[in-house]
Amino acid sequence: MKPNFRNDYSEIMHPRILARLAEQNLTKRAGYGTDEVCASAAAKLRLKLTRDDADVHFLVGGTSANLIALSAFLRPHEAVICAATAHINVHETGSIEAAGHKLINIETRDGKLTPSLIEQNFARYTDEHMVKPKLVFIANATELGTHYALAELRALRAVCDRLGLLLYMDGARIGSAMAASEVGFADLCCVCDAFYIGGTKNGAPVGEAMVIVNPKLKHDFRYIEKQRGGMLAKGFILGHIFDVLFDCNLYLELAGHANKCADKLRSVLAANGVPLAYETATNQVFAIVPNGKLGRWTDGVICEINERRADETVLRFVTSWATSEEDLRAFEDAVAGI
């Protein structure tokens, strides 16, 4: 069987989550996230964040989390500043635009926004004849596998404060970003008005934990969550999932394992003279291969085509919490044979 590095959500769930769900299968609980298990998971997360005042909402998936959050946080005429490669701009079927909010997307070198890029684009919108930039959307890790250093996040916070902008973080792969950097749970609350902790791509079958820090954004969030179809009747399922993930250090342990496996992929590619499109330290690896050899690559390894260029193609390989030594050996053998 070919080694599979298509994404980090191909496996269903971490065994500890499966065991919890099996154990609690017939236990009756209140619905819509009002149960004691959701309360326990939220309390564990607040402890990690060191913020007792943070609102925590458990949602099903990343696209719906972004749609619900931005719908709740923005007025109809307000717009979002984001990287051109941002998930909301490329892979969410225009959901934010369908909700009535323009995306001001910016070309970047590595998928990351900078204060100067934000300032330059903010300045283009001058009066009521245009949309009003109100929220900066970042992802950590980005869609290109890069991640923000703590100093970079603090710089973004400073420019947002100066311009009166909200800072929202898509945390689908925040575990990978934190495991690759000095950024900790508590830092997220210091730099972001709101963010989510991704579960789907870090060992959970489904689920993201939305955290709202800014008091001005908390009001009526559950109304928007329900209106946008994100309120799960069996919300206790999400509670169990995150209660396990936030127990001890499991969440970051899983992300750290994925990053270490990606380091192995990078080493194998370097040993075989395969250049990388982006310098990453997270669980996404982007390799540049000649178009003439593309078929041999896709025949040997299951992965995704990230970008097609004139004479070459960028392939994306993604490791996960479940990547095994056998997977890594199979990748090494496959690359050596291409």
Image: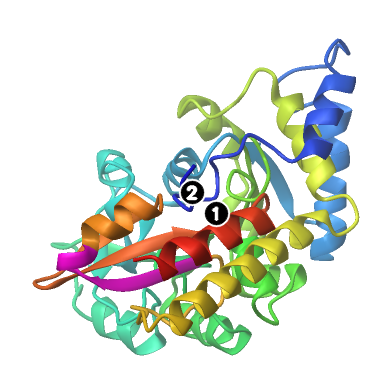
Residue placed most toward the observer, 150 or 134: 150
- Residue where numbered disc 2 is placed: 4
The location of residue 195, given as percent across then percent down, is 59, 58
Q: Residue at x 71, y 75 (%)?
A: 187
- Kindly tell me whether residue 46 is visible in this rendering: yes
**Element class at badge 1:** loop
> How many numbered marks have been drawn onto this rendered protein structure?
2
- Describe residue 231's horizontal placement relative to residue 284 as left or right: right
- Describe residue 316's horizontal placement relative to residue 101 as left or right: right
The location of residue 117, given as percent across then percent down, is 31, 84
Which is in the foreground here, disc 1 or disc 2? 2
**Element class at badge 2:** loop
Magenta segment includes 299: no
Q: Are marks 1 and 2 in contact (CB under 8 Å)?
A: no
Residue extending farthest front: 337
* Marker disc for residue 172: 1
The span shown in magenta is: 284-293
